[in-house]
């Protein structure tokens, strides 16, 4: 739970009834990303992954009252090809689909979510928080470096059907 600008915000797990607000939030985010030249997300991703995230109890929301300010998924890390981590065998978590509502950008909430994810990971015994960033997403790379993440060696290649996306690995010790 955090207080931001006199407004109290809290973290909680997402529920199925949050899906329509999440669709709206992620749609606004991907439109803003497209406008800034980062063409990655669309009307299907990350939204199509959210029902599974909710069912697995890995989708976290940062809420201001009934409004969703940010969301992210946190899960146990599983092997990603092409990336060499600092301690490859250390237990780790992966943060995915981090998004901050366009109504709440530039307020430090993305960093607060990363800090909360790191705290959750540490509580669960995971020594690292890891993630992938598409190589073309320079704003995300800069954000995660600002949050203290270090870039791992290597590149992960993900075939998306209409072309490959190159992913860079980042990690931070919890």
Image (cartoon, grey):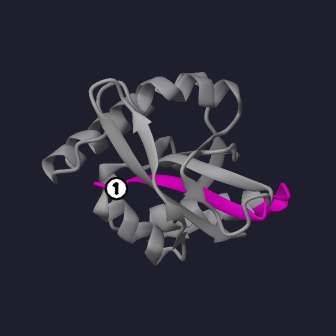
Q: Is residue 21 above or below residue 101?
A: above
Residue drawn at (50%, 41%) of the image? 66
* Residue 21 is at least partly visible in this image: no
Quarter in which the N terminus is drawn: bottom right
**For residue 58, what is the image quadrant?**
top right
Residue 130 screen position, x and y as percent: 61, 58
Q: Nearer the viewer, residue 142 or 169?
A: 169
129 relative to 43 in the view: left or right? right
Residue 127 screen position, x and y as percent: 78, 65
54 relative to 120 in the view: left or right? left
- Number of marks: 1
**For residue 142, what is the image quadrant?**
bottom left
Mark 1 Cα shell of 10 Å, populated few (<14), some (14-19), many (≥20): some
Q: Which residue is mark 1?
A: 135
Q: Tell me the SS state at disc 1.
A: loop
Q: Is residue 48 above or below residue 103?
A: above
Q: Is residue 72 above or below residue 125?
A: above
Residue drawn at (71%, 29%) of the image? 56
Residue drawn at (30%, 26%) of the image? 43
**For residue 120, what is the image quadrant?**
bottom right
Q: Is residue 70 above or below residue 108?
A: above
* Residue 55 belongs to magenta span: no
Residue 19 screen position, x and y as percent: 48, 25
* Residue 44 is at least partly visible in this image: yes
In the image, the segment drawn in magenta is 122-136
Residue 24 screen position, x and y as percent: 34, 32
Q: Nearer the viewer, residue 91 or 70?
A: 91
Quarter in which the C terminus is drawn: bottom right
């Amino acid at each position: 739970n955090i207080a931001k600008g006199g407004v109290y915000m809290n973290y909680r797990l997402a529920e199925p009834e949050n899906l329509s607000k999440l669709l709206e939030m992620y749609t606004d985010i991907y439109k803003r990303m497209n406008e800034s030249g980062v063409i990655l997300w669309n009307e299907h991703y990350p939204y199509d992954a959210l029902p599974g995230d909710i069912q697995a109890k890995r989708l976290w929301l940062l809420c201001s009252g009934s409004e969703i300010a940010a969301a992210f998924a946190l899960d146990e890390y599983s092997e990603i090809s092409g990336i060499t981590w600092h301690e490859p065998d250390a237990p780790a978590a992966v943060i995915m689909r981090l998004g901050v509502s366009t109504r709440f950008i530039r307020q430090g909430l993305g960093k607060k979510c990363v800090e909360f994810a790191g705290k959750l990971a540490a509580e669960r015994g995971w020594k690292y928080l890891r993630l992938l960033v598409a190589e073309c997403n320079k704003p995300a790379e800069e954000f995660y470096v600002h949050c203290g993440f270090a870039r791992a060696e290597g590149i992960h290649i993900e075939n998306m059907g209409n072309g490959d996306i190159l992913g860079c690995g980042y990690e931070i010790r919890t």
